[in-house]
Amino acid sequence: MNHITLIQTDKFKDTQVSIRFLGANREPDITRRSLLAYLMLDRFEAYPTKQAVNLKTDDLFALSFDVKVASYGSLHALEYRFTTLSERFSGEAHLVEAIDFAASCIKAPLFTPETLQEAKTNLKAALLRIMDKPSSYALISALRLGGEGEPLANFSQGTPELIDGITLEDLKAFHLQMISEETVYVIGIGQFSSKHHERLIHHFPQRQTAPSPVSPIRIKPIRTMESTKAVKQTALVRLYATSKTNADADYAPVRVMTYLLGQLPNALLFTEIREKRNLCYSIYSSLLHFDGAMMVSTGISADQINTVVELIEQQITRIAEKDYPEELLKSAKALLISNYTGLKDDVLSWMNVEFSAWLNEKPFDLEKICAQIDAVTVTEVAQAARRLVAVSQAVVKGEA
């Protein structure tokens, strides 16, 4: 499929462009990409000071940009995304210049001992903040345990222990490999013309087709972890293998089942554990689409761990046995369809769903997706629930 997608719309006053480089979801590459993302935030060879960058972005009608990393199954991506005023409002043809600016930032960051050290300091601080949060630490631990030996086990933001060992020459070589060899995907939403498409192709030609990101986790005996932190609330995360990914034609029942379990305002988990018994502060389920996995996350009291785990399993059993009101299934499908139809009201969500479809080598067809959701039956949802297998559980107990 075409690696450049430009979607014409006058829905927004801004034009946004996302450029993603895709490599293997493995260490030490993950940590290298994370370091690059921090290093590429505010200084470049053509604009060696923060003031120079600010002056240039002001010239481009308050252009803003961000650089982030994320995992998609077996792939790990560095994304450079910029936003600038649509030319229909600026009255000037500045988008080509904005594209050229983005390309120069991506291709020529300012590599110096100082910028590398600053990136290392910022990445370490970010990882420390994440690990200090009980819910985040429980999540990362559950993925590491349940995905051991597979891409899911790798934390997308990097590994603290690897940071200091990355040298300036290491990062330069990795950056050169990224921009010259890795698969690149570009998506823009806003106002474009053929010259903008040509400019993007000029800067970001396709080199190779991305390998499939689909990497469903293996079913294995459940592994558990428990630690303590000086906090009041205990965080619990259970990870399940679903045996399905978003590349499967029959994935819609998995989505509906997850909404029924823990994403509706009156989902089974929330109703039975929070509302009826007041055993948790929050609880929800979510999918890792490319990894064939589902998570249940909650914040509870430390003395309620076993009770809450038992109640989670009971709700999954209820779905498997079709033991819930028919209206709840209708509500789950209605909310899921509503969320899909609302995607195009948010640029980032729209970009992400188009990107996911591209990774699976199929176009994003909203009408088809909504029809598939609407057609899901109670039996198909029950089958999705019966396929769930718990593969890990992580608990961070509060001791305050």
Image: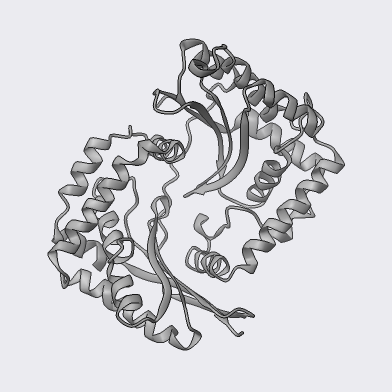
Residue 142: where, in percent of width, then height? 50, 68
- Residue 393 drawn at (x, y percent): 46, 74
At horizontal 41% and vertical 50% (from top left) the residue drawn is: 290
| Camera-side residue of 77 and 59 | 59
Residue nearest the viewer, comparing 16 with 210: 16
The residue that appears at 33% across and 65% down in the rendered structure is 262
Indicate left or right for 399 with 314 as reference: right
State whether residue 185 is above or below residue 341: above
Q: Quadrant of residue 6?
A: top left
Which quadrant does the C terminus fall into? bottom right
Image position of 137 with respect to 346: above or below? below
Judge whether 352 appears above or below 124 on screen. Answer: above
- In the rendered structure, the answer to whether residue 36 lies left or right of residue 95 reads right
For residue 251, say whether it is visible: no
Q: Quadrant of the N terminus?
A: top left
Q: Is residue 355 left or right of residue 176?
A: left
User: Where does the image place residue 301, in percent across and percent down from the top left?
Assistant: 48, 83
Where in the figure is residue 352, as x and y percent of width and height? Answer: 44, 40
The residue located at (73%, 41%) in the rendering is: 39
